[in-house]
Amino acid sequence: MKNIYMLIFLTITVQLASRPPLLSIHFLNAGHGDATLIRTPAGKTLMVDCGSRTFGQVHLPRIMHLFRIRQIDALFLSHPHDDHIGGVHALLKNVRIKVLLEPGFACDSSVYCKLLNNCQRNNIPIQFPTAGTSIHVEPGLTIQILSPPAGLFRYTRSDINNNSLVLLLIYKNIRILFPGDAENVALAALFKRYPLLRCDVIKIPHHGSRTAHLPGMYRKLQPSIAIIPCGRNSPWGIPSPLLLYSLKREDVKIYRTDINGTIRIDSNGYTLSVQTNKATHFNE
């Protein structure tokens, strides 16, 4: 009997050892903000936005401790609004940031100015990638910058939103699109520049606002999964009913941080699995 248990133990151990490491993407429940934590198969840590200042102060130190993160290899900030970059100051107090990437759109907000000062004080290099840039993260994993263009958008409804970094994460056969808060002007330019753009997962732009929705865009993109980062009882009416209708019409599986909490997607580069944690609710 002892030998049988030992055989079972060895079989399980071999199976675990032979299981390839996964790409894990955590769409954090940041209330009305936006924050995504990415763990790569080779053990690197990336973040796309980091939520509001309150979210950062209350939750990011605990999250970094939970995942035993001491270093963020690359922090992508889509645009300089507090609900996306406010948490960076809490990050700086708890982990090392190797490089920060942001669109470089001039903004005089106090949060953004403080961010630049803190990066300079901590010797954190800042890069301003534009459309066409490709970042090799590790073998099999790249991030393509699809927007903003080198000539930034001007005189739109929201230049800050429309100049969001738009990222396409490609891991083997899987594509995940991060459009930031890009609105219709930027989205129209995106489809014009990349008419064959497709993705398996999309983080819905601008929290599901009606200002970030083009007719037929999800039919073009053909995602199987949509992640909507939004807070409960939104005073802005997001996600918009039009967005939800469009996604359901294209048979896209919808996950929302206000309903599902933090959403985790794991991938081996060929398939996707989704887990949710309703216990993680934050609504500032």
Image (spheres, grey):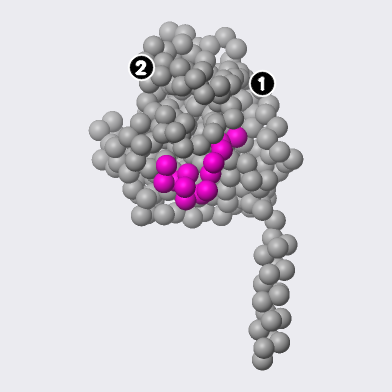
Counting residues from the start of the chain, the first of labels 2 and 1 encountered is: 2
Q: Secondary structure at mark 2?
A: helix
Q: Quadrant of residue 17?
A: bottom right
Where residue 132 is drawn, which disc sits there?
Answer: 1
Instruction: Say which residue appears at 41% left-offset and 54% top-offset.
Output: 277
Instruction: Say which residue appears at 51% left-offset and 18% top-offset.
Output: 120
Q: Is residue 172 visible?
A: yes
Is residue 28 shown in magenta?
Answer: no
How dense is the environment of label 2, judged by Cα within 10 Å: few (below 14), some, or many (20 and up)? few
Q: Quadrant of the C terminus?
A: top left
Q: Position of residue 275 (x, y in %)?
A: 49, 55
Where residue 110 is drawn, which disc sits there?
Answer: 2
Q: Which amino acid lies under the numbered mark 2 shown in the image of this protein?
A: Ser
Is residue 67 shown in magenta?
Answer: yes
| Disc nearest the viewer among 2 and 1 | 2
Residue reaching furthest to the bottom: 1
Q: Position of residue 257 (x, y in %)?
A: 39, 45
Q: CA distance from mark 2 to mark 1?
A: 30 Å
Q: Bounds of the magenta span?
A: 61-73
Instruction: Say which residue appears at 59% left-offset and 30% top-offset.
Output: 98
273 left or right of 247 in image: right
How dense is the environment of label 1, judged by Cα within 10 Å: few (below 14), some, or many (20 and up)? few
80 left or right of 47 in image: left
Q: Secondary structure at mark 1?
A: loop
Q: Which amino acid lies under the numbered mark 1 shown in the image of this protein?
A: Gly
Where residue 230 is drawn, which disc sits there?
Answer: none
Contact between marks 2 and 1 (CB within 8 A): the answer is: no
